[in-house]
Amino acid sequence: MSLASLPLFVRLNGRPVILLGEGEPAEAKHRLLDRAGAVVVGEGAQASLAIVAIEDEEEAQAAIARLKARGVLVNAVDRPAACDFTLPAIVERGPVIVAIGTGGVSAGLAAALRQRLETLLPAGLGTLAEGLYAARAALRARFPDGAERRRAIGAALSPGGPLDPLAGETGVDAWLDGVARPAATVAAFVLTSHDPDDLTLRQARALAAADRVYHRADVPPAILDRARADAVRIESDALPAEPGEGQIVDLTMDTRA
């Protein structure tokens, strides 16, 4: 399944961004650019990004065409077909930023999802992120192997874990003092649907945490896409006797039920 657009986080502090237009839409974009530390400039300036918030259709399209002819990437307010990039709804917890985008199709839906997430994400989430950042050297010393380190952090951050982010846990140092090497696990699932939305919560969590995913040839790519991007996917008729270290998931299809 292809992405309609690739989400990116761009550092704009001190960098110029062209903003054209007047009124509330332009002012809202100006406030957002100010928060990101961008330098708001006019059309004649040199910049890589531009936001066009001009209400008049003919004037807006002319500005969009001029900017694109210069190789500038354009966000055109209320004109998704003309956008090279879109601006998502944002939930911010310190260094943790959750962005919700719809490709410009429905800003209202993105805003509604943002409001839901605001109630779910604890205020201490940024503190947890900063604690994990500060503990990088200690984590590398405790777990020199990168895959093992990732499994330990994943287990700590899992639901009910000592660093469960949705439970408001922030005690990184206390966890690191007592953490042990994570045990290797194998989870085998018989899938009864080709639809990834039919995965159980346990199956979805196991896929999201897996280091390697063994699967039969008939397991659809849409389900394999629920695994981490860096998880190794291995097509195999059966799970090997020694599947390796880490968290292993084995997938078989059976849709006869």
Image (tube, helix red, strand yellow):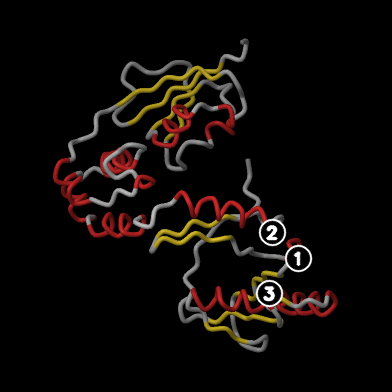
Amino acid under disc 3 = Pro
Alpha-carbon neighbours of circle 3 within 10 Å: few (<14), some, or many (≥20)?
A: some
User: Quick one: SS at disc 3?
Assistant: helix
Of the numbered discs in the image, which one, if any, rests on residue 104? Answer: 2
Judging by the rendered image, the residue that carries numbered circle 3 is 25
Q: Position of residue 20 (x, y in %)?
A: 69, 81
Q: Position of residue 240 (x, y in %)?
A: 37, 18
- Residue sticking out furthest to the front: 119
Query: What residue is drawn where x is 35% and y is 38%?
Result: 158
Residue 110 vs residue 163: left or right?
right
Alpha-carbon neighbours of circle 1 within 10 Å: few (<14), some, or many (≥20)?
A: some
Q: Position of residue 126 (x, y in %)?
A: 35, 59
83 in relation to 129, above or below? below
Dividing the image into 4 quarters, which one contains the C terminus? top right
User: Mark 1 or mark 3, which has the lower sequence index?
Assistant: 3
Residue 115 vs residue 203: left or right?
right
User: Mark 3 or mark 2, which has the lower sequence index?
Assistant: 3
User: Quick one: SS at disc 2?
Assistant: loop
Alpha-carbon neighbours of circle 2 within 10 Å: few (<14), some, or many (≥20)?
A: many
Amino acid under disc 1 = Arg
Query: What residue is drawn where x is 55% and y is 31%?
Result: 223
The answer to whether the residues at label 2 and label 1 have Cβ atoms under 8 Å apart is: yes
Q: Position of residue 24 (x, y in %)?
A: 68, 77
Query: What residue is drawn where x is 71% and y is 55%?
Result: 105
Residue 118 vs residue 185: left or right?
right
Relative to the observer, which residue lies in front, 158 or 169?
A: 169
Of the numbered discs in the image, which one, if any, rests on residue 79? Answer: 1
Relative to the observer, which residue lies in front, 23 or 211?
A: 23
User: Quick one: SS at disc 1?
Assistant: loop
